[in-house]
Image (tube, coloured by chain):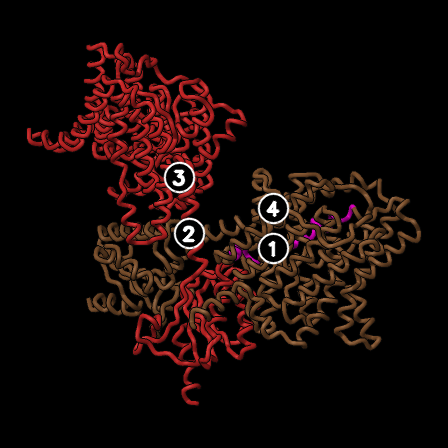
Chain colours: A brown, B red
Amino acid sequence: MPDMNQTRARLERHLPILTWAKTYSRDTLTSDLVAAVIVTIMLIPQSLAYALLAGLPAEMGLYASILPLVAYAIFGTSRALAVGPVAVVSLMTAAAVGNLALQGTAEYAAAAITLAFISGLILTVMGLFRLGFLANFLSHPVIAGFITASGILIATSQLKHILGVDAHGHNLVDLITSLMAHLPETNIFTLLIGLTALGFLFWVRKGLKPVLLNTGMPPRLADILAKAGPVGAVAVTTLAVWIFNLESHGVKIVGTVPTGLPPLSLPSFSADIWSSLFVSAVLISVIGFVESVSVATTLAAKKRQRIDPDQELVGLGTSNIAAAVSGGYPVTGGFARSVVNFDAGAETPAAGAFTAVGIALAALLLTPLLFFLPKATLAATIIVAVLSLVDFSILGKTWKYSRVDFAAVAATIVLTLGFGVETGVSAGVLLSLALFLYKTSRPHVAEVGLVPGTQHFRNILRHDVETHPSLVTLRIDESLYFANSRFLENYLLNRVACEQPIKNIVLMCSAVNEIDLSALESLEELNRLLGDMGIRLHLSEVKGPVMDRLLRSHFIEHLTGQVYLAQYDAMVALTPKEEAA
Amino acid sequence: MPDMNQTRARLERHLPILTWAKTYSRDTLTSDLVAAVIVTIMLIPQSLAYALLAGLPAEMGLYASILPLVAYAIFGTSRALAVGPVAVVSLMTAAAVGNLALQGTAEYAAAAITLAFISGLILTVMGLFRLGFLANFLSHPVIAGFITASGILIATSQLKHILGVDAHGHNLVDLITSLMAHLPETNIFTLLIGLTALGFLFWVRKGLKPVLLNTGMPPRLADILAKAGPVGAVAVTTLAVWIFNLESHGVKIVGTVPTGLPPLSLPSFSADIWSSLFVSAVLISVIGFVESVSVATTLAAKKRQRIDPDQELVGLGTSNIAAAVSGGYPVTGGFARSVVNFDAGAETPAAGAFTAVGIALAALLLTPLLFFLPKATLAATIIVAVLSLVDFSILGKTWKYSRVDFAAVAATIVLTLGFGVETGVSAGVLLSLALFLYKTSRPHVAEVGLVPGTQHFRNILRHDVETHPSLVTLRIDESLYFANSRFLENYLLNRVACEQPIKNIVLMCSAVNEIDLSALESLEELNRLLGDMGIRLHLSEVKGPVMDRLLRSHFIEHLTGQVYLAQYDAMVALTPKEEAA
């Protein structure tokens, strides 16, 4: 029954769980369970910390790490991606929701839930309409610049918790000004806890693993223990606050975290709220998707697996919708946790579902223990995590390789730092598109000649080639379209305005991938103008798809010259007569 | 003194009048004077009519045809372009200013003056910074669609004057709804005048010239007389209103037009007004410039002259500033009047300055005669003029040639008619850019083989070519940049996932005009992944500028294969060993 098979194939594409669940074995279960335990331990402090970064109650971080993981396990295609709150998306959530409500209010939390819902809808719809390619319009350098600048913004925004002061702002200038103004109010106990936690976490990152390896511990276990550093910092500082009653000395703590499973929540359906959150939701969706997909692709390639970007959109979309209905906020695939999940041996998305169970147990049983957890410790966790994202080498790399890429990165970094995440990333995308369009609007045109002894033509300025005074061959290194059609017209008319006895011009079209109607009209005009001057216009090496289209117009009929399959044929046909003369 | 010569050359570039004034002779003077008289006769009714279309007092049309022409004569580079109020720009003025003030108020006229000033500044600054290339981003089909839709909007908007009723709206639906609602109030005398004028003008356009030719009149004179038709209609209908006292029967007339030279006027410098007019001013500037430059280029080419687009921006910019300080409104180079000027023998921009004198005389002496001029006659002039702009053939042409171009035109027409000129033209530009980006994001990739007996490679699907199972050659028909880097990665990884014993992949880069950093990173990743599969990656026919850039990175060092100058060399190097085995 082919129909049945087709239906099953389609079902498996939309529900990847059907593919891997069929072959799920006891071995896979063991691997997944081990990975889940490790990721759970890592995720508990992270979830709390990122909720803090987003300006939300700590429990919303936990809630965002339960149901969304289950949704991704059903709809996602990556075997190792670990979904949940991540730093950049948390910062973007704070920026988006901060425009609508004050931190700490019920409206603020409700707006974050709505943001997750809108973002989930956008992602799911993009996935169903197979619009995953849209994410390609974010260039690598722009993303790299954006992540670096976001890391700096995030780290700076957390300094207030290390100092124990109030400070606000969505860009670097505001943040620093605000911090400076409140510096005299620094709480010395908070600062002590914060600096100790920072020092410990930085050391754990680099120094713990070698120490553990020296004790003869297996490398993988040492690696995992080093990743669990934040849990140690959380436990020790929480105990310290409790024992020394530091709360009464002004150390800010997490306080009561409700015990229990995530509550059922509903997004707002107010048109006002939707319209003010929509653009932010688009940006969060795209940034979250791009980050997530690149992690997933990298991990999949290591095991020769492939991921389906359009189905990934559905996976992340349903995760966000799941976050919205269970008191969470926008989530995506995180880099650090996915790598840990992969390294810990996760084989299927079931590992994610098991992690969800782990976090749910934490929400049920551990929340009372978090009462005395100092916010400074969570801030230290965030700072150490995001500083690893900061990497200015992209500036040097692009400067060396291409000034255009450099301009896009530099603008993204400066604008993100100066005007916040939304302005920064939007400007980066628009600028990189504008620069691409600008480049294509002034194409490189090379005058070419025959490389002696071959049938190959190269730039006369770079190679020692044969040419003939009556024949000019121009290789146009760009598709011809409206933005450069006038450029070509000017270039050619200037080229023929000389003493040289030009009789034939050949446009070598090996690099012309498209001729649109504007360019066709320019070519017709050129053909006419050159014809008036007694110069014949020829084409060579026109590609199949371009030629098909030209044949649908009257251009070839009116062309004063010929169309040659190969440039060599054009040269042979257009020079001997002259040489005989 | 080379310095002196340089200064003079620069001065002549910025003040084209210095070039032609040097060789100005009595013959040139005669030609220019004759052309000026003819254009003046044509311009008087047109200026009044377009002011009416813009919702402004009739005299502002005259004022916009005096000083701006002098400014263009000094700064413009076209010998035949006739500057002044034109239909599309007048409609755009009405749309822009209509958002700010009510027609007939002093604020409305002041806003139009300010609009001319802002537009003049934008054009001049663009010219000084040599940004004329920006206009290239308007594709020919989008312009054609926009002009056609504007023509329909303009003609419809004038029907109210033919019927003698009130009606308003900036899009077709509003205009028609409003006309239908007021239809019962139709004034029968107005309708009679309007229809007679329409019939007469349509007949003059097609039928007058043959009649005159039959009387033995020289063709050029017949042509010019036919162009003067509107003056006849104005004279006869004005007389009719006066003699039969039609004003008292409800026929709307132009009324008092102040006598005298243009008053000195100043634009508003209110930040509010500037910010609400700015986007409109950009659109008017760009549309006006594109229209004007294409007329100027066409006329210049007929006499083997060239125009300088950047200096044209300065010419039009100063014209608009001149309009703003002399009680006018936005102007640009008009198609019909420039052709008349050219045909009448104008040899230098001095013809424009003489026309300005003619219009100034009219403003001084003829305005009392315009008192009884019925608005219906002016509306008929506009309708006949703009219907010649309406040309739906662009739809058929693009449909046949390229669906992408068709989509851009159709959207421009539909949105201009449905949502007004500003939405229409903005959407057209954005859509054509988006479609171009979309196309480049999914490049055509052809698998190629050797055309037997040559060194030439073509698509294996279109040509009978030689290939070898262990060697796959892919010609990528697009520059590699961020928007398509992931596409290429997917394409190649899917291509090698087959039974074929592929050992070498050659990317033939003859059509790759650029590899940006995102694409480079994708290529590095591909090189690594293919290397893991035991497949070597080679490049061939890499262009000079692209190779220069690749050498600045570490890509070539890490490449598992070679870079070949010619694809034929790659084929020779990579197949014989296999064939011997």
Q: Mark 4 lies on which chain?
A: A
The quadrant where residue B207 appears: top left
1 and 3 marks in contact (CB < 8 Å): no
Read off the magenta span.
A135-160
Q: In this view, does B59 lie to the left or right of A368?
A: left
Q: Which chain carries label 1?
A: A
Residue A136 included in the magenta stretch of the image: yes
Circles 1 and 2 on the same chain? no
The type of residue carrying mark 4 is: Glu
Instruction: Identify the residue shown where x is 83% and y is 75%.
Output: A214
Mark 2, secondary structure of its residue = helix
In the image, residue A472 lies at what x, y percent?
31, 60
Q: How crowded is mark 2: few (under 14 residues within 10 Å), some or many (20 or more)?
A: some
Q: Is residue A106 left or right of residue B12?
A: right
Rounded to the nearest angstrom, the CA distance separating label 1 from label 3 is 33 Å
Instruction: Identify the residue shown where x is 42% and y is 73%.
Output: B473
In the image, residue A377 lies at what x, y percent?
81, 53
* Residue that badge 4 annotates: A422
Q: Residues within 10 Å of mark 3 (few under 14, many from 20)?
A: many
* Residue that badge 1 annotates: A288
Q: Mark 3 lies on which chain?
A: B
Question: In which quadrant is the N terminus of chain A drawn?
Answer: bottom left
Instruction: Identify the residue shown where x is 36% and y is 44%.
Output: B142
Is residue A19 positioned above or below B136 on the image? below
